Amino acid sequence: MFQITSTSFIINSSTSPHAPTHSTHSTAQTLHKDYCSKRQSTGITTNSSSVKFNKYSSSPPTKADAFEEFKRERGSEINRIFVENKKTLGDKKRSAKELAAVINKSKKKIDSTTSLLANMRAERIAEGR
């Protein structure tokens, strides 16, 4: 049983909570170091009277970490659809850009032909035909 008091750290190795506890100052320091290392590796948090085990570490994950975990677990299907839609959007943007280039080239050709036609009409009028 783990127990934290305000002045010392005591571990009862006995299964009985009423068994006597023997500790020296150096033993208490060693036990405290062991406790701290176990706490970090297992996610143990403390309050003033006892040690409790948490499913998660003592601090919550960052938003980015939590979001990545969500995308791997519960949101995996949503994330897969999102990635697929993002790829489709990129493909459509490239296609639209290529199509716009073709349209602009055609418009320049139309403008050039219209200008040439207008010049030819002006020449005919000037010649008197």
Image (cartoon, helix red, strand yellow):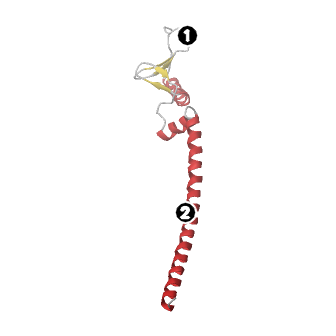
Task: State the image coordinates of residue 86 (x, y, percent, origin top left).
Answer: 56, 47
Amino acid under disc 2? Ala
On the picture, is 82 further left or further right than 51?
right
Task: State the image coordinates of residue 80 (x, y, percent, origin top left).
Answer: 59, 40
Image: 13 above or below 30: above
Task: State the image coordinates of residue 121 (x, y, percent, origin top left).
Answer: 51, 83
Q: How many marks?
A: 2
Task: State the image coordinates of residue 96 (x, y, percent, origin top left).
Answer: 56, 58
Amino acid under disc 1? Thr
Mark 2: few, some, or many residues within 10 Å (few <14, many ≥20)? few
Q: Which residue is mark 2?
A: 100
Image: 80 above or below 126: above
Image: 127 above or below 64: below
Mark 1: few, some, or many residues within 10 Å (few <14, many ≥20)? few
Mark on residue 39? Answer: none
Mark nearer the viewer, 2 or 1: 2
Residue drawn at point x = 56 percent, y = 60 percent: 97
Q: Which residue is mark 1?
A: 15
**SS under mark 1:** loop
**SS under mark 2:** helix
Residue drawn at point x = 53 percent, y = 31 percent: 40
Residue drawn at point x = 50 percent, y = 41 percent: 64
Residue nearest the observer in this picture, 95 or 69:
95
The residue at the far bottom in this view is 127
Q: Earlier in the sequence, mark 2 or mark 1?
A: 1
